[in-house]
């Protein structure tokens, strides 16, 4: 019953937010040398229906490479003062023959506090997410399309503040 309520809420709200990011989000990407790509684990149910972390990673990295955005290793990003990582989080739950999802893409980097004691911390400085419902048969295609849309938006914003 809980899944039905969630599905109804997601359907009624139409929670897709794929649009241009704010100026401050875009500006937070200026000067970054690239990103390390981190993919959240996929549920076993979603894997059984054809979605894989490898397919997501390939799609993300292909778009970044074609946009001339550096893909850093874990050790390379640790050497950068900003420690930038692009976190891809496909939250997927199953309810009957349907999946409900909330896919988010976030740029997380080290930032400095401007108040109180000088300190640095990790913070999300750029974010996009989309929620929806999909049939078992279309899961992989829909999730990959959503992720590719957000990665393209990220790449466009990155290129806007880091021209070639």
Image (tube, helix red, strand yellow):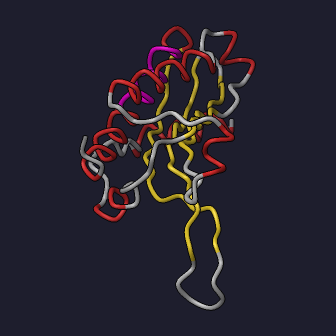
Vertical comparison of 134 with 163: above or below: above
At horizontal 36% and vertical 46% (from top left) the residue drawn is 17
Vertical comparison of 121 with 50: above or below: below
The location of residue 51, given as percent across then percent down, is 60, 15
**Quarter of the image with the N terminus in it:** top right
The location of residue 52, given as percent across then percent down, is 62, 16
Say whether residue 62 is left or right of residue 121: left
Camera-side residue of 77 and 11: 77
Say whether residue 66 is left or right of residue 86: left
Magenta segment? 139-149
Say whether residue 47 is left or right of residue 151: right
Say whether residue 39 is left or right of residue 149: right
**Magenta segment: does it hold 147?**
yes
- Main SS of residues in magenta: helix
At horizontal 70% and vertical 29% (from top left) the residue drawn is 41
Vertical comparison of 118 with 82: above or below: below
The location of residue 154, given as percent across then percent down, is 37, 42
**Quarter of the image with the C terminus in it:** top left
The location of residue 33, given as percent across then percent down, is 45, 46
Vertical comparison of 85 with 143: above or below: below
Camera-side residue of 157 and 131: 157
**Magenta segment: does it hold 32?**
no
């Amino acid at each position: 019953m809980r899944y039905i309520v969630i599905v109804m809420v997601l359907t009624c709200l139409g929670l897709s937010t794929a649009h241009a990011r704010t100026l401050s989000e875009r500006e937070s990407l200026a000067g970054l040398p690239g990103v390390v790509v981190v993919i959240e684990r996929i549920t076993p149910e979603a894997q059984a229906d054809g979605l894989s972390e490898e397919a997501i990673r390939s799609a993300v990295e292909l778009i970044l490479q074609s946009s001339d955005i550096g893909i850093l290793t874990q050790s390379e990003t640790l050497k950068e003062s900003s420690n930038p990582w692009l976190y891809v989080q496909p939250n997927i739950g199953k309810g009957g023959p349907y999946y409900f999802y909330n896919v988010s893409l976030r740029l997380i980097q080290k930032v400095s506090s401007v108040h109180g004691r000088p300190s640095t911390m990790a913070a999300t400085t750029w974010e996009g997410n989309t929620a929806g419902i999909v049939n078992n048969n279309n899961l992989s295609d829909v999730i990959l399309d959503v992720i590719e849309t957000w990665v393209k938006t990220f790449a466009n914003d990155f290129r806007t503040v880091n021209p070639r």
